[in-house]
Image (cartoon, rainbow, N blue to C red):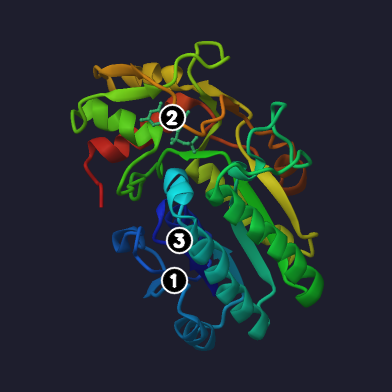
Amino acid sequence: MYLVVGGAGYIGSHINKMLYQNGMDTVVYDSLVYGHKEAVKWGRLEVGDLADPVRLEEIFSTYDIEAVFHFAAFAYVGESVENPSKYYNNNVANTLHLLDAMVRHNVKYIVFSSTCATYGVPEKMPITEDMPQKPINPYGASKLMIERILADYHHAYDLNYCCLRYFNAAGSDPDGEIGESHDPETHLIPLVLMAATGERENIKVFGTDYPTRDGSCIRDYIHVTDLADAHLRAMAYLKNGGESTCMNLGNCIGNSVLEVIEAAKEVTGKEIPTVLAKRRPGDPPMLVGSAAKAEGVLGWKPKYGDIRVILEHAWKWYSEKKCY
Ligand code: UDP
């Protein structure tokens, strides 16, 4: 049995589906603070918070857990700056409850959801794993702290880990069964599609004077189903005796905000009212990841690298109004 912590969220629910499709039994542990119970269509759902060690102990005593995928975290960068206590308590202190339960129950494998936000504002592109990690906000710092804690738990308790540093997770399940739905929504692609359906008046382009090819920010959008595939490979790698490690998951393709909006117009066939706006504080001009390590170690290659395909799948989800 695999424990999927945060499996009712956007990324966790896609991994939970792929685990099921590969014949792996799962139990999802999710507080449902940001997750959606409707997204847990496979395996079991146990509602509970990482803040509650008694409930966690109950889960580890009830199920025969062989390994853990850990997605549960707060992930609003701006909020993390305003309220770091919320982020360090939830993302760091509460994760210790999970890791300690794993140690107590002799569960040896964990795949951890990390982020390119641990790099801060890197000087070179594409970003490789050996570049300095200097997060510029508490969200990124909280994820980096867990990376460090995992290295220490590995050393002391023989807990084997793989940290996957995602670039911009995007798109939806190609079958349209689950998708991306955040409240509040702050991510570019869902907001662009909401502007296409008229749910929002327009999409604001945050900054048009960056030193990039068209002045808007460049990000590396990676399909959530490609992320899911990498998680299954990372777990198989650990269970086959692979060294504990961290790796990037990205496409090594950068798309600017304006390019995403143009592609969304083509995919949806809709007008997307666009407003050129000021920079959003804390946004690096460009973040593009090298996934050469994931390719070498896991044999992973993204299947859905084209931004149009990412948008098509996201649009299928939105246009069929399957928001939770
Ligand atoms: N962005 C934008 N308008 C929006 C939301 C986001 O121009 O309404 C930009 C944002 O400045 C960034 C990119 O889109 O350059 C991706 O932002 P998102 O919040 O989706 O992900 P992030 O890169 O911040 O993790």
Residue lying at the far top of the rendered structure: 214
Q: Which mark is residue 280?
A: 2
Give the mark nearest the N terminus, 3 or 2: 3
Q: 134 or 8, which lies in front?
A: 134
Q: Judge from the rendering whether residue 61 lies leftward or rightward of residue 30; answer left or right.
A: right
Q: Amino acid at mark 2?
A: Arg
Q: Dot 2 surroundings within 10 Å: few (below 14), some, or many (20 or more)? A: few
Q: Judge from the rendering whether residue 136 lies leftward or rightward of residue 155; answer left or right.
A: left
- Disc 1 to disc 3, how far (Cα)? 20 Å
Give the mark nearest the N terminus, 2 or 1: 1
Q: Which residue is mark 1?
A: 29
Question: At 70% from the left edge and 64% from the top edge, which residue is drawn?
Answer: 150
Q: Amino acid at mark 3?
A: Lys
Q: Which residue is mark 3?
A: 86
Question: At 64% from the left edge and 38% from the top edge, which residue is drawn?
Answer: 301
Q: Amino acid at mark 1?
A: Tyr
Which element type, helix, strand or loop, lies under badge 2?
loop
Which element type, helix, strand or loop, lies under badge 1?
strand
